[in-house]
Amino acid sequence: MRIATWNVNSIRQRLDHLLTWLRDSAPDIVCLQETKCLDEAFPREGIEALGYNVVTHGQKGFNGVALLSKYQFDEAQPRLLGDDEDVQARFVEGVVSLKSGVIRVACLYLPNGNPVGSEKYPYKLKWMSRLLEYSRQRLKTEEPLVLAGDFNVIPAPADVHNPAAWVNDALFRPQTRESFQTLLGLGLTDALRAVTDEPGQYTFWDYQAGAWQKNWGLRIDHLLLSPQASDRLTGVGIDKHVRTWEKPSDHVPVWIDLDLEAA
């Protein structure tokens, strides 16, 4: 089973890219972020024509997440619990039945948090605390769980081209990285780091200053796995070639392969 995550940076602008990639890569479950449209405006027809079931949690012009699955969802739930006043569309989870049980996939678009001196950084940290509580509760079920998405977290110096330039950025501040490590401390596995310690495994390149051409990248798109999922991990990949396409997203897809057989 292949599960992927991709911040498409506007589903309507990047629909042709998405459809091409879906045909080429044929992932079983896909988590999309920054869809930037209301649920009723999501261009689901072309995606459904490729055999995917679609669940969206959208917002006009900003944020927005979606789950695509070749298998029917047993259940799907938008919103991250813990703050009824938070109206930003940043989270959706779905459950799929397998011969061995179920797998739960949560698609998330964690707040950026910049500028740090504004209300945006406390919001980011509070959101991470809510994600921590969600994960703590979900791990109690001892089922395969995948948290996938744009975390807006650079976990370590090896995950950014020039660490010194990012020390005061919300993505790399010590409190941000500590919150991410606390998440891993619950028992979640960073899928990519489970298979390689190599630096330069970037998933995002800014549009400015020739970042892509110079490979000035960041690794901020992650797939975190519960023990029941990490035990089945057989591969991880970053589809960097997608960044070379015309008018691309500034992120590229990241995927994992799990030795799980769908029902």
Image (cartoon, rainbow, N blue to C red):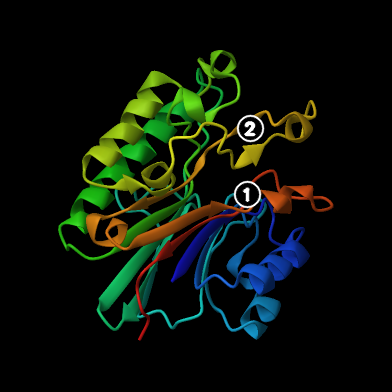
Asked if residue 75 is positioned above or below residue 250 in the image, the reply reads: below
- Residue at (64% x, 50% y) in the render: 252
Q: Where residue 99 sits in the image (x, y, percent)?
A: 29, 84
Q: Give whichever of discs 1 and 2 has the lower sequence position.
A: 1
Quadrant where the N terminus is found in the figure: bottom left
Provide residue 185's location: percent of width, then percent of height. Answer: 23, 38
| Count of numbered circles in the view | 2
Dot 2, how many residues are within 10 Å of its Cα: few (below 14), some (14-19), or many (20+)? many
Viewer-nearest of discs 1 and 2: 2
Residue position marked by numbered label 1 in the rendering = 62
**Three-letter residue code for mark 1:** Phe
Q: Is 218 displayed left or right of 171 in the figure?
A: right
In contact (CB < 8 Å): disc 1 and disc 2:
no
Q: Which mark is residue 217?
A: 2
Q: Please, which residue is most extreme toward the left here? A: 140
Q: Name the residue rendered at 28%, 47% in the picture.
A: 188
Q: Amino acid at mark 2?
A: Gly
Foreground of the two, 232 or 154: 232
